[in-house]
Amino acid sequence: MGYLPRERLEPLANSAVLPTGTSPAPAWLPPVAPGSDRWWLATAHAELRPPWATQHFDCALNTRLAERPRPALARMMGRLAADVVALARQRFAHTGAAQGSRPFEAIAGLEPCERATGPGRTAPSSPATGAMAAGTYGELFAVLVPEAAGAVRRTAREIGWSRAVCRMNWPTDVEAGLELGVRLFAAAAAQPDFATDLEAARAELAAARAEGLTSPACAAERRALGQWRAPPPRS
């Protein structure tokens, strides 16, 4: 169960976001070669389920969240993820096929960096649900660790843009998803039970950072991001 009841999701489902759609040219997608380090990082970023998604923020937070269970943090991320899925479904119910097909469906011979079969191949591209989750998680960690807010928001953008690197969503759909994720978090943070969960997660995250552990994957992440980085947000 998420934080937001249906009536709270409805305004977000109907809200205007960045224009979305498809492009006729593969060059419109991020110039990341299949099999490159950034390609494999995008593949890893596809895992957005709590608690595994916490590891994507290890380097930005200079810790190792997946070292042991973090139940309060996993619970918060799980509830936010439930809201993301509910919002994506509501938006699809409003706009349906108008949201457009995914890049690998629109461009012959274009393969995504993850397996897409059945409903995964025909699901609409906009807004990018993975980018929505990334934007929401980024705001959560920015509130939990304000001194690292810039770093975690940059990480959230990279996770979101990995959906375009993977040929799963168009860049405009990624930006729409990131924007909706930020809005969703703001709505969730206004709910009565959010503050209690936040304090428990904050204490848990502070304890994790005090352990002094870091992720051995950070060097590989820096190398991958040296090949291609997500564009900065709109001013």
Image (cartoon, rainbow, N blue to C red):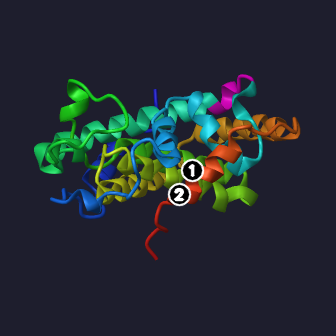
Q: Is residue 205 left or right of residue 177?
A: right
Contact? badges 2 and 1 (CB < 8 Å): yes
Crowding around mark 1 (Cα neighbors within 10 Å: few <14, some 14 to 19, many 20+) is: some
**Residue 203 appears in the figure:** yes
In x, y percent, where is residue 16? 27, 61
Q: Quadrant of residue 71?
A: top right
Is 165 a magenta residue? Answer: no
Estimate the spatial distance between the alpha carbons at disc 2 and disc 1, rounded to whole Å: 5 Å
Disc assigned to residue 224: 1
- Residue at the spot of label 2: 227
Q: Is residue 185 left or right of residue 210?
A: left
In x, y percent, where is residue 95? 15, 47
Instruction: Tell me the kind of residue under disc 2.
Output: Gln
159 up-or-down from 55: above or below = below
Q: Residue at x 36, y 35 (%)?
A: 85
Secondary element type, mark 1: helix
Secondary element type, mark 2: helix
The residues colored magenta run 68-73
Instruction: Tell me the kind of residue under disc 1.
Output: Ala
Q: Is residue 211 left or right of residue 75?
A: right
Q: Quadrant of residue 142?
A: bottom right
